[in-house]
Amino acid sequence: MPQSRRTAFHLGILLMAAAFMIWPGMALAQSMSFDLGTGSDATLTARLFQVILMITVLSLAPGILIMVTSFVRIVVVLSILRSALGLQQAPPNIVLVSLALFLTAFIMAPTFERAWNEGMRPMINEDVTMEQGVSNIIAPVKSFMLMQVGSGELAFFDALAARSFGAVKDPSGDPPSPPASPSIETSGPGGGAAAMDGKDLLAMIDRAAQMADGPAAGGGAENGGADAVSLRILLPAFLISELRRAFEIGFLIFMPFLIIDLVVAALLMSMGMMMLPPAIVALPFKVIFFVLINGWQLLAGSLVLSFAG
């Protein structure tokens, strides 16, 4: 075979190989399908709305879990402890948040197990409707909040809602819960729709403050149990109650460290060392005092027991 024909033959083979290499082939990527089912336009619209609502709830799930659990009280107390010790970045924020999350999971484990067994699992197995499953999930969380919320905060927001928006009706269809505190008489155009003035607000605060500061479980039972209290009233009352109790615990934590600061400042003044900051000298004493009394264990145990009963 002449050299020119041999070269042309080899060139043709190379061109055919290149053509096979660049020939488009079938992509073997995983296929995805999003089936909303068959039915009328109204059914498809309802299912699409359910999907959008579920995605929205999942995106807000971390914030919702923080609002309805013991996380708020724990993380506020831990932050106050760090301030009382005089430490700026030790422990770091990530450590405090992680500790608060683990303690929250420990405290809320019975509530989450009940919500899973009574609501989530039957809904996944399609034993109950989505509406009934969501209601069963909310019920144990609502019971936990009622056990922890102060009766004063619950009465205040109940009266505030009744004064501002009228009787609050529970979304489940139950009759509206009666105000936990006596109704507030107001004078103004429009009767119940009149704007609240300063005197009405002060009267409402005074009546709420006169109530017991204990948990509102008994009051909830008198009003028909957890179903008689609307989440619209329970959520802000629970958050305010958690912040109040966190500050009460923080005050008790601050006192021994404040005494150490005062003693160190008095000693430095008596020795004429006024240029030396007392906070720097008191810091190691506060740290070793907290370590010697096994402060972390005491604090964690106290926080967990504060949610018992």
Image (tube, helix red, strand yellow):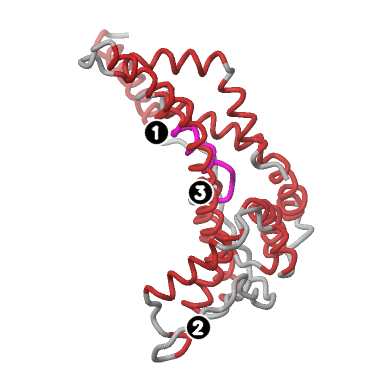
**Where does the C terminus fall, quadrant-wise?**
top right
Q: Secondary structure at mark 1?
A: loop
Disc 1 versus disc 3: distance between alpha carbons? Answer: 71 Å
**Can residue 75 be seen at all in this image of the molecule?**
no
Residue 124 position, x and y percent, is 72, 52
Q: Which amino acid type is marked by label 3?
A: Arg
**Where does the N terminus fall, quadrant-wise?**
top left
Residue closer to the observer: 76 or 200: 200
Image point (51%, 30%), residue name: 98
Please report contact status of discs 1 and 2: CB closer than 8 Å, yes or no: no
Q: Which amino acid type is marked by label 2?
A: Glu
Disc 1 versus disc 2: distance between alpha carbons? Answer: 84 Å
For label 2, the crowd category at 10 Å Cα-Cα, with few meaning under 14, some 14 to 19 and many 20 or more, is few
Image point (46%, 89%), residue name: 191
Please report contact status of discs 2 and 3: CB closer than 8 Å, yes or no: no
For label 1, the crowd category at 10 Å Cα-Cα, with few meaning under 14, some 14 to 19 and many 20 or more, is few
Q: Name the quadrant containing residue 87.
A: top left
Q: Which mark is residue 185?
A: 2
**Residue with the mark numbered 1:** 23
Residue 298 position, x and y percent, is 61, 25
Point out the tag, 1 or 3, that comes first from the N-terminus.
1
Residue 155 position, x and y percent, is 58, 66
Q: Secondary structure at mark 3?
A: helix
**Residue with the mark numbered 3:** 244
Image point (66%, 34%), residue name: 106
